[in-house]
Amino acid sequence: QVQLVESGGGLVQAGGSLRLSCAASGRTVSSYVMGWFRQAPGKEREFVAAISRSGGSTYYAGSVKGRFTISRDNAKNTVYLQMNSLKPEDTAVYYCAASSKVAYYSNDPDLYDYWGQGTQVTVSS
């Protein structure tokens, strides 16, 4: 079992940047495919990005590709989401998730076993 804690959210102007972190405790994060999801008010949770266990493969939602970068440091048991060129429509609670079921990466939240509590990202126009 692994516990996930996100940090790094906040309020930023459109065009700005934020870096989210997801710190894992318990089982080592290298055992899991890791993903970031987000949920805006009144909307369903949506996939943002995922990264394979080694970090060699990444996968992005079309809406963030080219602006967001997912990475991981297995030695620090931490996963990151660098968010650049932020837009008001990126406003949401961002969640980190871990999957033991997925081979390399997945955008299906049902395949993720563990979730953090979320961190709020607000982008003002």
Image (cartoon, grey):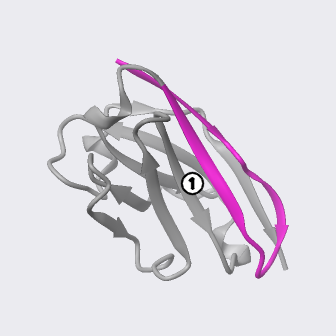
Instruction: Using the image as rendered, state which of residue 44 and residue 75 is in the foreground.
Output: 75
Query: Which of the 4 quarters of the picture holds residue 56?
Result: bottom left
- Residue 17, position as x, y percentages in the image: 73, 70
| Residue range corresponding to the magenta coloring | 1-24
- Residue 58, position as x, y percentages in the image: 32, 64
Tag 1: Cα neighbours inside 10 Å, few (<14), some, or many (≥20)? some
Asked if residue 68 is positioned above or below residue 73 in the image, the reply reads: below
Q: Relative to 101, is 41 on the left or the right?
A: right
- Residue 24, position as x, y percentages in the image: 49, 29
Q: Residue furthest front?
A: 75
Query: Which of the 4 quarters of the picture holds residue 18?
Result: bottom right
Residue at horizontal 72 percent and vertical 48 percent from the top: 8
Q: Relative to 106, is 10 on the left or the right?
A: right
Q: Principal SS element in the magenta part?
A: strand
- Residue 86, position as x, y percentages in the image: 69, 75
Q: Is residue 10 visible?
A: yes
Query: Which of the 4 quarters of the picture holds residue 74?
Result: top left
